[in-house]
Every structure is written in structure tokens, then in C-alpha cells.
Amino acid sequence: MTRGLVLCYHAVSDAWRDPLAVRESAFAYQLGSLSARGFTGSDLTDAVRGRAGAVHCTFDDAYVSVATAVELLDRFRVPATVFVITGCAGGGEPPADHAGDLRAATLSWDELRELAARGVGIGSHTVTHRHLTTLGGGELARELTDSREQIEDELRQRCRALAYPYGDTDERVCRAAAQAGYEVGLAAGAGRSGPFDAPRISVFRHDGRARFRLKTSSSGPLLFRLAAATRLRRR
């Protein structure tokens, strides 16, 4: 059995044809195929620790389509954590990458509270979704601490998990995440090891059934890392 999986999604939408938006039918297939292979829904901690057969879904940016995804997650009994950009949540604005695109609207605080009441975890994706490795110490601390504190104030619950924007992290950022009060920090790809650089499997609209199965196999992460390294050498 493959070790625990933490899957990284963004949006689930048929209408929004962005690479980040997985089709609803594809998402349902992916959850069903994992169940058929013996995976069971798990809390984030167990999946990060690599418990065999554990699976947890995460959603970066907190797009409104997460509400659609939650219905399917409930059907397959797979827990989820949504990572919110707190600077967007006040008015449901799209992240800067998709400014002006109404299809990229994000969940409001009221909608996030509704998800939290249903048992969905809410984590931080920082305040403004910047590359954390480029920030000075003061800016980095504010992005991490202010977002965590606002989530806790708005939702009246602990914010334990952080997802690094763009998966951009290094040892300094990992230390800052620990100092800011988080218990786990998630990359957007292979990661390295440890609770503050935990790996995730990113899933996109173009991932067909065979590619998804490969990504979620025991050898998948290694194969994709080797392919990425080969592409870099050829540049």
C-alpha cells in the first residue's frame, strides 16, 4: 500500500477552464479510484506523517468552487483542508494572479465559517500570497503571523496548518513557520521531509486517469522529480 497521500487541488469546476480547475467528473473519479485502491480518508496529521493508505485533500486559495468539491468529499468520506489567503477573504476577491476574473472569486469569511462547521479544516495561505523566500524577516513574519491570527479571530478555532504560496519555501521560511505558531507547513510538490516541508501531490485539469494513478502511486513522486531534474539539465 502506498504511504499516506496529501493531495493539492485549487478549484473544481467544469465552467472555469483554467489549468487549476479540475473537472467535477474527474474529481469524482479520482476520489473513487483512491477508495477502490484501498485508501481511506484521514486527518491531515496522519496523512502528513505518511500512514499507509491515508489520504487527505487540500485546496489552496479558497476558491468558491470548493463548496462543490465538499459535496463529493462527503460522499467518499475524505476530509479536507482549505488554505485561505486572508487578504482576499474579506470580500471574496480573486488572488492577484487572477485579478478581475469573477470565476476565480474566493470564499468569504461567512462561507469559510460554514465549511468549518461542516468539519473542513481551515489553514493559512498567508495574507497576500507572495513568494515567501523573497521576503525580509519582518515581512515574512507578518505574512505568517497576521494570517494565522486573523483566521483564529474570524473562525474562533486554532489555525495549525500553513500552505506555502507557490510551494516556495526554504529552511529559513520553515523556521519562521514554526516560530509563527504553526504545526505543519505544506509544500506544493515533492517537499523534502519533516512537518514544515511536507510533500503534496498537485493535481491539475490536464491530469488524465493514467497520469493521476501514476502521481498517486508509490513510485510516482520519484518519477516526476527525476523528470523535472532532466528538464532542468536540458535548459
Image (cartoon, helix red, strand yellow):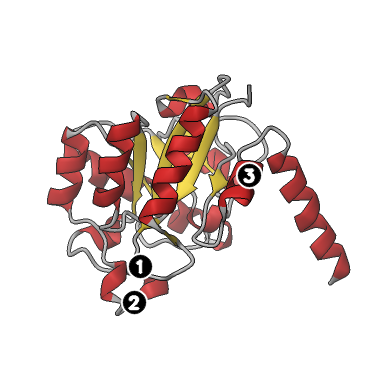
Q: Check residue 215 in the rendering and tell me which mark sits there, or answer none.
A: 3
Q: Position of residue 106 (x, y in %)?
A: 26, 61
Residue pictured at 21% horizontal, 63% vertical: 92
- Disc count in the image? 3
Look at the image and tell me whether residue 46 can be seen: yes
Q: Using the image, determine if residue 235 lies above or below residue 174.
A: below
**Which residue ends up furthest to the bottom in the rendered image?**
100
Label 2 close to label 3 by CB (< 8 Å): no
Per the image, label 2 sits on a secondary structure element best described as loop
Name the residue located 84 percent from the left edge and 72 percent from the top edge.
Answer: 235
What x and y, as percent, mark residue 34? Answer: 50, 33
Distance CA(mark 3)–CA(mark 1): 27 Å
Identify the mark at residue 99; answer none if there is no mark: 2
Label 3: element kind: helix
Mark 1 lies on residue = 95
Q: Position of residue 61 (x, y in %)?
A: 37, 56
- Identity of the residue drawn at 60% across and 46% down: 172
> Distance between the Cα atoms at labels 1 and 2?
6 Å
Q: Secondary structure at mark 1?
A: loop
Amino acid type, mark 3:
Lys
Marks 1 and 2 close (CB-CB < 8 Å): yes
Kindly identify the amino acid type of the residue bearing the numbered disc 1.
Pro
Front position in the image: 129 or 23: 23
Name the quadrant of the N terminus: top right
Residues under labels 2 and 3: Cα distance? 30 Å
**Mark 2 nearby-residue class (10 Å; few <14, some 14–19, many ≥20):** few
Indicate the amino acid at tag 2: Ala
